[in-house]
């Protein structure tokens, strides 16, 4: 008898080059004057002795030994060649771990067989999992090797894990140019974090705008806004409410529901809630003092409508930290 030949495929073609150098000597076991012939699984004759190395897939070879002088004296046996397949599976080449959403679960997919065992190692060679999945908490190069129940191992596959995180933003990172012909909101990107971010703004009472790569928004109308900073790797979105101050150039108090009051735009209970606005006529006479968080001035003085003309204002905007902005200007009252 010849011991079965069992090997793991050394690539992915299902073939292996077996060493057959000792087969015939084993079969004959010291006999002389014998003829040895070989037949493959399809009934085709093979050379004798077998080629060495013998490149073959899994198959059973039939062997016949006959006496050269008495051809009716024969003995037969078989030789089993088994090539176990190399395990195969798929693995993403790259992924992102969100440091604010740890741990990150990685997984292989589409394994050729369901009963593989696995070994996940980090870039220092430490095993972090022996399952189909692995949990990681930091970036780096991770390697996976699968082993079949026959002991065959796959090619090692690597996945590059990049790190990202949700942004961290404060009011000090927002630069606002307001009360101008070109109001601008600008986000200072240094200090946001290691993520890949995009930006959007939403004015109070309106829908959020489109996200963009540039952290600058120009030609912004006055009002209360929410600034959105979103990580492109789905690590999360942070928001920050801001105020863009504006002073209308005119108002038309005719009770048509549009521009019936004059007030500073961009002020509410969260922004500059302790502020006051003083309105004067062109001679410097104080007409009224109004709270920016209210409706504003309706164009009356002591119950009497004032005429269409220009009026002046002084406003002290006091934020939660006690910082004061003083602005002065003028606007027109237009009666239609």
Image (cartoon, rainbow, N blue to C red):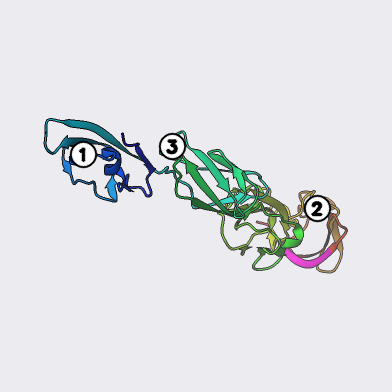
Percent from the top left, x then y, of residue 246?
71, 61
The quarter of the picture where the C terminus appears is: bottom right
Q: Which residues are magenta?
A: 325-334
> What residue is pinned by disc 2?
304
Percent from the top left, x then y, of residue 42?
18, 37
Q: Earlier in the sequence, mark 2 or mark 1?
A: 1
Q: Residue at x 63, y 61 (%)?
A: 220
Find numbered disc 2 in the image and state the secondary structure of the residue it sits on. strand
Magenta includes 303? no
Q: Front-most of 35 and 273?
A: 35
> What residue is pinned by disc 1?
40
Q: Quadrant of residue 290?
A: bottom right
> What residue is pinned by disc 3?
150
Q: Nearer the viewer, mark 2 or mark 1?
A: 1
The quarter of the picture where the N terminus appears is: top left
Magenta part, dominant SS = strand
Residue 22, numbered label: none
């Amino acid at each position: 008898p010849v011991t079965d030949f069992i090997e793991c495929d050394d690539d992915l073609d299902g073939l292996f080059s077996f060493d057959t150098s000792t087969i015939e000597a084993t079969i004959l076991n010291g006999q002389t004057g014998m003829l040895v012939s070989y037949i493959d699984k399809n009934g085709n004759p093979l050379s004798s002795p077998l080629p060495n190395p013998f490149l073959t897939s899994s198959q059973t070879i039939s062997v016949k030994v006959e006496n050269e002088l008495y051809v009716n004296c024969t003995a037969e046996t078989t030789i089993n060649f088994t090539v176990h397949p190399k395990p195969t599976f798929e693995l993403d080449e790259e992924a992102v771990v969100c440091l604010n959403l740890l741990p990150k679960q990685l997984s292989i997919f589409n394994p050729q067989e369901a009963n593989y065992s696995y070994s996940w190692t980090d870039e220092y060679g430490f095993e972090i999992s022996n399952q189909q999945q692995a949990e990681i908490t930091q970036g780096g190069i991770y390697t996976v090797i699968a082993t079949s129940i026959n002991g065959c191992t796959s090619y090692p596959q690597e996945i590059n894990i990049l790190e990202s995180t949700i942004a961290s933003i404060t009011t000090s990172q927002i630069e606002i140019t307001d009360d101008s012909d070109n109001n601008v909101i600008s986000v200072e990107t240094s200090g946001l974090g290691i993520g890949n971010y995009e930006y959007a703004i939403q004015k109070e009472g309106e829908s959020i705008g489109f996200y963009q790569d540039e952290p600058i928004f120009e030609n912004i109308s006055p009002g209360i806004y929410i600034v959105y900073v979103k990580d492109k790797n789905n690590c999360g979105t942070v928001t920050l409410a801001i105020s863009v101050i504006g002073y209308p150039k005119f108002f038309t108090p005719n009770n048509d529901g549009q521009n019936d009051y004059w007030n500073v735009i961009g002020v509410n209970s969260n922004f500059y809630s302790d502020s006051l606005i003083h309105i004067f006529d062109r001679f410097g006479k104080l007409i009224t003092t109004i709270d920016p968080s209210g409706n504003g001035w309706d164009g009356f003085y002591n119950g009497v409508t004032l005429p269409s003309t220009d009026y002046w204002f002084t406003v002290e905007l006091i934020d939660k930290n006690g910082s004061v902005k003083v602005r002065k200007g003028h606007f027109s009252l237009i009666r239609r």
